[in-house]
Amino acid sequence: MRLFISGSAPLLAETHAEFEKKTGQRILERYGMTETGMLTSNPLDAERRPGTVGFPLPGTEVRVVDDAGRPCAAGEIGHIQVKGDNVLPGYWRMPEKNKEEFTPDGYFRTGDVGSFSPDGYLSIVGRSKDLIITGGYNVYPKEVELAIDELPAVAESAVIGVPHQDFGEAVTAVVVPREGTPAPTEAEVIDWLKARLANFKVPKRVYVVKELPRNTMGKVQKNVLRDRYSRLAD
């Protein structure tokens, strides 16, 4: 085998490193959508940086903007928008959706949020719809998930927002324990995060489960989790 490629969902940097350690091969991670084809890729013959999807491909323009549509500085998280001949010209007979999904200057709103490094590598931190707004603060689930996944007893996690009467949304974590280790308690996870994150990013509740719900592509179904744990919060 000469080449291993990852797509469909962001690859954990830890998984990237573990794969290289076991196989001697560095995964090439890239980024694309049904509406656009491939947009960015880590280079074939240069640094394949863990936690990133590389650079825009030739003929593709990629930008990261804030809520007002202004370009974000390097390292600043914002909305990923793309433009190029590979991007669909519009949705068939859906003019209202096209007004919603395309900017006035012709960029397609991917629905993903991310940031560029100072040297041009793009990182994706999640979907716009997964953004949690708690007490007026924005919380990006990926940041919290990465911190939780550093806990030795955790195999993987998913962070969602559920309705809260005081904060609007409450940060909530769903955790899968690592096989062969005792499952972490809610208090252990929260204490771990309090030492690593701002207080408003720390989950108010932590649920431990055997596995996370996934679709046929293997992506975690956060809509299912939101529905399930919103009912528990009622």
Image (spheres, grey):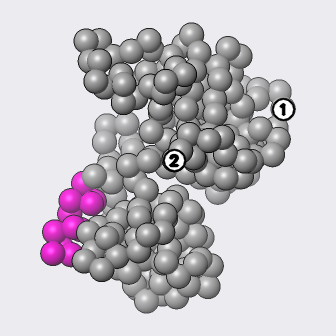
Residue range (magenta):
224-234
Q: Is residue 5 left or right of residue 201?
A: right
Q: Which mark is residue 46?
A: 1
Question: Image point 37% across, 63% down: which residue?
Answer: 160
Q: Quadrant of residue 55?
A: top right
Q: Is residue 172 left or right of residue 192?
A: left
Q: Position of residue 217 (x, y in %)?
A: 37, 36
Q: Quadrant of residue 10?
A: top right
Q: Which mark is residue 67?
A: 2
Q: Foreground: 16 or 32?
A: 32
Q: Secondary structure at mark 2?
A: loop
Q: Position of residue 224 (x, y in %)?
A: 24, 54
Mark 2 surroundings: few (<14), some (14-19) or many (≥20) residues within 10 A:
few
Quarter of the figure with the C terminus: bottom left
Depicted 121 relative to depicted 200: above or below: above
Amino acid bearing label 1:
Ala
Q: Foreground: 49 or 94?
A: 94
Depicted 223 relative to depicted 146: above or below: above
Question: Image point 52% across, 88% down: which residue?
Answer: 191
Give me the C-alpha separation between circle 2 and circle 1: 33 Å
